[in-house]
Image (cartoon, helix red, strand yellow):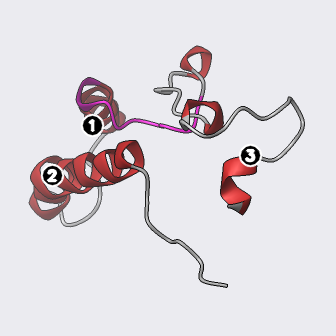
Amino acid sequence: MAVDLAQDAHVQDLAERTARFVREVVVPVEEAHGGVLPSDGERVRLQDAARAAGVFAPHAAPSSAGTAWTCAAAPRCSPRPGTRCSARSR
């Protein structure tokens, strides 16, 4: 039995946007500061930029400052609370 490892379009889009954000925003800041952020303010600025780009904590609920990509957001998935996503076993 073959295993389909293809990602859904919304997952692929999130991965591409995240990679672009890291390349264009995070890496230049790291390079400018030798890999060590100079202040908590710089970390907050990066988090704010990630939120604006829609890539900050995609697994976390909005009440936890995340962007709320959840298993239930997957088109084939409607798990019951406390159960694993049925789409993951397909």
Question: Going from the N terminus, do you reach mark 2 or mark 3 first?
Answer: 2
Magenta range: 52-60
Note whether 73 is above or below 8 in the view shown: above
**What residue appears at the point 38 percent right and 42 percent down from the top-left corner?**
10
Is there CB contact under 8 Å for labels 2 and 1? yes
Q: CA distance from mark 3 to mark 1?
A: 31 Å
Left or right: 35 as drawn, with respect to 84:
left
Question: Going from the N terminus, do you reach mark 2 or mark 1 first?
Answer: 2
Q: Which mark is residue 29?
A: 2
Does 70 appear in magenta?
Answer: no
**What residue appears at the point 48 percent right and 37 percent down from the top-left corner?**
57
Q: CA distance from mark 2 to mark 3?
A: 37 Å
Residue found at the very far front of the displayed protein: 1
Amino acid carrying mark 2 in the image: Val
Q: Main secondary structure of the magenta part?
A: loop
Left or right: 6 as drawn, with respect to 47:
right
**What residue appears at the point 44 percent right and 66 percent down from the top-left corner?**
6
Q: Read off the residue under disc 1.
A: 46
Q: Read off the residue under disc 3.
A: 85
Crowd tier of the residue under label 1, counting other residues whose Cα lies within 10 Å: few below 14, some 14–19, many 20 or above: some
Residue 2: percent from the left, percent from the top? 60, 83
Amino acid carrying mark 3 in the image: Cys
